[in-house]
Amino acid sequence: MKFRQSVTAIMLISAMSFAASVLAQADRFANVSIETVPVRGKISMLIGSGGNIGVSAGEDGVLIIDDQYAPLASKIKAALAELGSDTPKFLLNTHFHGDHTGGNADFGAASIIVAHENVRGRLLGENSPASALPVITFDDDVTVHFNGEDITLIYMPNGHTDTDSVVMFSESNVIHMGDHFFNGGFPFIDLGNGGTVQGYIRNLEKALSWIEEDTAVIPGHGPLGTKAELLSFYNVVKDTSIAIRVMKSQQKSKEEIVAAGLGAEYASWGTGFINEQSWIETVFDSYPR
Ligand SMILES: [Zn+2]
């Protein structure tokens, strides 16, 4: 009897803490509004909380790239309705992180989700509901023919994670970089999920070689960018990585490199999501001694 009472009490407490965490999550997004930024032609970018969403809206309907967090789905749908339809025909995922796929379970009920096979694998590993899973997967690249152009996802191996793609729009002259671009800040590179600094740099070189001077560049995080801004991001990632590797090769410890710092010219790059210390630690851990 006593046992049953305590089990009931535990169940009640866990139900209460579950409700509290749902409320806290809802609270966190209560004041988030979705801003629509026109990019070029049929392409727009939605900024809210989490990864920037790319939108193609035209005669075939709506296609979106990434979907931020689950509690934002209704606000995202309201913004999409303004662009033509609140029900995308296709949802492309740049990678598996929850700030880019949180709305999958909701959108996946009516939209076809397309992503690299490793996105499906990692979401399955997290016990995601069936409607959150990509139903079309690929290994190198795949093209969706939609709204009068080729919309191509291209796999970017072992960069931000081992699940990433960039998305190129053939006619609109737009690229969505996913988390291979933090516009104005040091990147997050997820070493625990197949990301590497070396791969990240190689992937940036590939993307830079594919685009034009006037290509509009949608970053995973930060404001809408240009090729010039992607190039300065690449230079910061590459140059600071080299500086950190040089210090490491001089037998400096991680702590000593953090204390030495990267210099005033990079100060503004550490003010966002990833500060200078986290970036130094990531590079240090990504390269063998
Ligand atoms: Zn990410």
Image: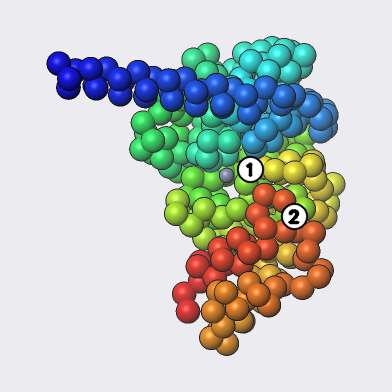
- Whether residue 288 sits left or right of residue 54 in the image: it is left
Residue 22 sits above or below residue 84 on the image: below
Q: Amino acid at mark 1?
A: Gly
What residue sits right under mark 2 in the picture?
271
Rendered image: mark on residue 178:
1
Rate crowding at label 2 as few (under 14), some (14 to 19) or many (20 or more) other CA atoms within 10 Å: few
Tell me the mark number nearer the camera, choosing from 1 and 2: 2
In depth, the one of 108 and 172 nearer the eye is 108
Residue 246 locus on image (x, y percent): 62, 81
Q: Is residue 31 visible?
A: yes
Question: Measured from the top left, where is residue 185 in percent x and y?
Answer: 73, 54
| Total marks placed | 2
Disc 2: residue Cβ within 8 A of ligand 1's nearest atom: no
Report, in whole angstroms, how far the alpha carbon at label 1 lies from the one at label 2. 20 Å
Which amino acid type is marked by label 2?
Answer: Thr
Give residue 39's quadrant in the image.
Answer: top right
Residue in front for this viewpoint, 95 or 185: 185
Above or below, 230 against 22 in this view is below
Label 2's element?
Answer: loop
Quadrant of res 79:
top right
Identify the residue at horizontal 77%, vertical 73% (top origin). 263
